[in-house]
Image (cartoon, rainbow, N blue to C red):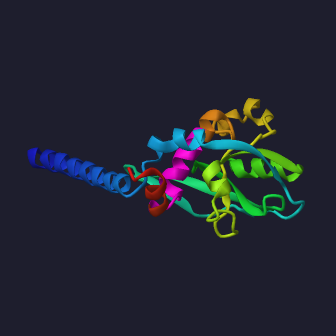
């Protein structure tokens, strides 16, 4: 009886140690987005983007990004994208909908695309560097849109409100989306160049 108790404690300790090592690896290999999120937001401005009718490329990507290792699973975020070309700016822009991966819920991007689909323009908050840099704006590397004047708000108050606690474009959502974008989506090379590393 005593041996099995000791074995159980050793097993639990080993699992905890492996989880800690796994999370340490993820922490060490990612950008420190939380530290620079407010700077990114402060260096952003509102601009009017022009939506081309019927010419948006929507990607409900099946892939997700692992952010942490849990006891019997992993914590992940999902990144869906809505790509379009603005003929005034002569650049491609991409609305990124970044949210925790949850099963049995409506994807936030499905609601966002409905909001954009009927409009000719959106007022979006864009990082000034990304708007003006020649490295951004191609189809392969579009200007990221993490916040715009989202109109569909009634979902936040209906019986399914628990599914919309991360409703797109609310201030808390926008800040968290910036943190996740900087941490997991921006390349380490660019992050280091723009923010001096960690």
Left or right: residue 59 versus residue 63 is right
The stretch of residues the image draws in magenta is 175-188
Q: Position of residue 88 (x, y in %)?
A: 83, 58
- Residue 131 picture quarter: bottom right
Q: How many marks?
A: 0
Q: Report the residue that reaches farthest toward the left.
A: 2
Q: Quadrant of residue 2?
A: top left
Q: Residue at x 53, y 38 (%)?
A: 38
Q: Was residue 27 drawn as part of the magenta stretch in this picture?
A: no
Residue 98 appears at what percent x and percent y? 61, 50
Left or right placement of residue 154 versus residue 77 in this view: right
Q: Could you say which is closer to the camera, residue 57 or residue 125?
A: 125
Looking at the image, is 37 positioned above or below residue 62?
A: above
Q: Image check: 118 left or right of 109? A: right
> Quick one: 22 or 5, which is closer to the camera?
22
> Would you say the magenta stretch is mainly helix, strand or loop?
helix
The residue most toward the bottom is 140
Nearest to the observer: residue 147 or residue 76: 147
Residue 70 lies, in percent from the top left, at 39, 49
Residue 104 at least partly seen: no
Q: Is residue 97 visible?
A: yes
Q: Is residue 20 above or below residue 162?
A: below
Residue drawn at (56%, 44%) of the image: 40
């Amino acid at each position: 009886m005593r041996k099995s108790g000791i074995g159980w404690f050793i097993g639990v300790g080993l699992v905890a140690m492996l989880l800690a090592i796994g999370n340490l690896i993820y922490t060490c290999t990612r950008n420190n987005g939380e530290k620079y999120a407010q700077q990114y937001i402060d260096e952003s401005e509102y601009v009017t983007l022009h939506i081309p009718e019927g010419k948006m490329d929507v990607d409900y990507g099946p892939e997700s990004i692992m952010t942490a290792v849990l006891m019997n699973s992993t914590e992940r975020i999902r990144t869906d994208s809505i790509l379009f070309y603005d003929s005034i700016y002569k650049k491609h822009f991409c609305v990124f909908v970044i949210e925790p991966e949850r099963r049995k819920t409506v994807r936030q991007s499905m609601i966002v695309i409905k909001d954009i689909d009927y409009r000719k323009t959106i007022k979006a908050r864009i990082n000034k560097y990304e708007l003006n840099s020649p490295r951004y704006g191609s189809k392969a590397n579009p200007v990221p849109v993490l916040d715009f004047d989202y109109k569909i708000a009634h979902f936040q108050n209906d019986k399914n409100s628990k599914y919309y606690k991360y409703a797109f474009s609310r201030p808390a959502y926008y800040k968290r989306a910036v943190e996740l974008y900087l941490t997991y989506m921006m390349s380490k090379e660019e992050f280091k160049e723009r923010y001096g590393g960690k």
